[in-house]
Amino acid sequence: MALSLKNSGLLAKPAPLNLPYLSTPPLKKIYYDKSLSKSVIVQNVLRGIKNDESYQNTEFAELEDYKEFIKESQNSISAKYDKRTLLIYPEKGNYLHACPGSDGVVCCRYHVLDFGMNCPYDCQYCYLQTYAKIPFLTVAGNVDFLLADLKQKIAADPEIQWRIGSGEYADSLALDKLTGMGKILIEFFSQIDNATLELKTKSVEIEHLLGLNHNGKTVISWSLNPEYLVENVELYCSSMKQRVAAAKKAIEAGFQVAFHFDPVIYFDNWENEYSTLIEYLFSSIPETKIRWISLGTFRYSPGLKEQLRLRHPDEFITRAEMFLARDNKYRYLAPIRIKIYEFLLSEMQKYSPEMMVYLCMETRSIWKRTFNEEIIGPAKLDARFEARRQTLIKKG
């Protein structure tokens, strides 16, 4: 089946927006629940805003009841996308849960560490635009409960190698210079034999982490897209080259790194753009320092297109020909997704035939067409992750 951009409904590329990278999130209001007055997170934030003149006019206040504050904010239309307010609150639920795979997709045993919600960046494809029920940024302040939850659940299954990642609901490091959560987690996981922490980010502010004793138990990962998409779609984020440069710094400090080509967006000249990106990545980063690379094509839930076009009428990412799949997400047609995955995999294998590459949120049939291999259940996929871990240990 021949496919072209003309029959996929894509528009010509608009001029780049060139919005600045937010190295310092522009927080104007920071609130914390009164139960957290002695929290290390609250104290870190207070110290951080005192030492950074960018926050000299930022309001920092205690709340009698954070739930009332959330309720009032949810009723405010003007606060729907409030990326300048941070709430530090006591999380009452489970911090750790299985990665929420969609219906019918191949999953592994990856677990998500949930310690915050929302992000100061503004990626047009972000599913939080329709998923998040609160308008502002949050971070959990009751760290003792978080660590206790982690310790209990990891200890309950000591025979497996846990892979636990933050970044599902909030960028792992965008606020980390203020909160200090990264340091707390890295030091905690450095003492856990059967678990690896992954910090997923688009931030490049990692200098405060480089001197930590991570004991090889933390992987710092970056999502990557061609520079054109960073400029037009990943608004206020660091550039592609800045992210790769940050990964090089992390490697020099002894960390392993990972990369996520997710979401891959199908646009004019996409093959050349992604080929250039892959060449730059592997010419900059030794493949023996890359723990894994994920691939996932752009998909979105009903409602995102309407929300996105209210805020960005000229957006182009939802104008391709897509269909509503069985997992209730709009996706590119299967032949287009296969074409994308086969191309990216082929390009990566030029530089690293043994790289651990996997598909995120994809169906079994797409897996089989891409890798020419049947993947049934998470055990086989988990074995690949573990084999990659052992291989890199041997290579040092």
Image (cartoon, grey):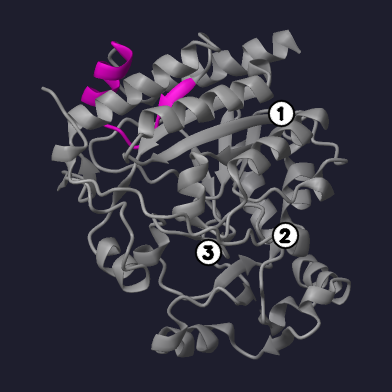
Q: Is residue 12 above or below residue 241?
A: below
First to last magenta residue range: 357-372
Mark 3 or 1: the one toward you: 3
**Does 366 lie within the magenta span?**
yes
Q: Amino acid at mark 3?
A: Met
Residue 5 visible in the displayed image: yes
Mark 2 and mark 1: Cα distance apart in space: 20 Å
Residue 282's mark? none
Q: Quadrant of the N terminus?
A: top left
Q: Is residue 111 above or below residue 231?
A: above
Q: Which residue is mark 3?
A: 117
Q: Residue at x 30, y 18 (%)?
A: 370
> Residue 120: where, in percent of width, then height?
58, 65
Viewer-nearest residue: 80 or 68: 80
Q: Which residue is mark 1?
A: 193
Residue 159 visible in the displayed image: no
Q: Earlier in the sequence, mark 3 or mark 2?
A: 3
**Does 255 lie within the magenta span?**
no
Q: State left or right for residue 176 relative to residue 114.
A: right
Q: Residue 151's image quarter? A: top right
Mark 3 and mark 2: Cα distance apart in space: 19 Å
Q: Which residue is mark 2?
A: 144
Viewer-nearest residue: 131 or 36: 131
- Contact (CB < 8 A) between labels 3 and 1? no
> Residue 324: where, in percent of width, then height?
15, 48
Q: Amino acid at mark 2?
A: Asp
Q: Amino acid at mark 1?
A: Asp
Q: Earlier in the sequence, mark 2 or mark 1?
A: 2
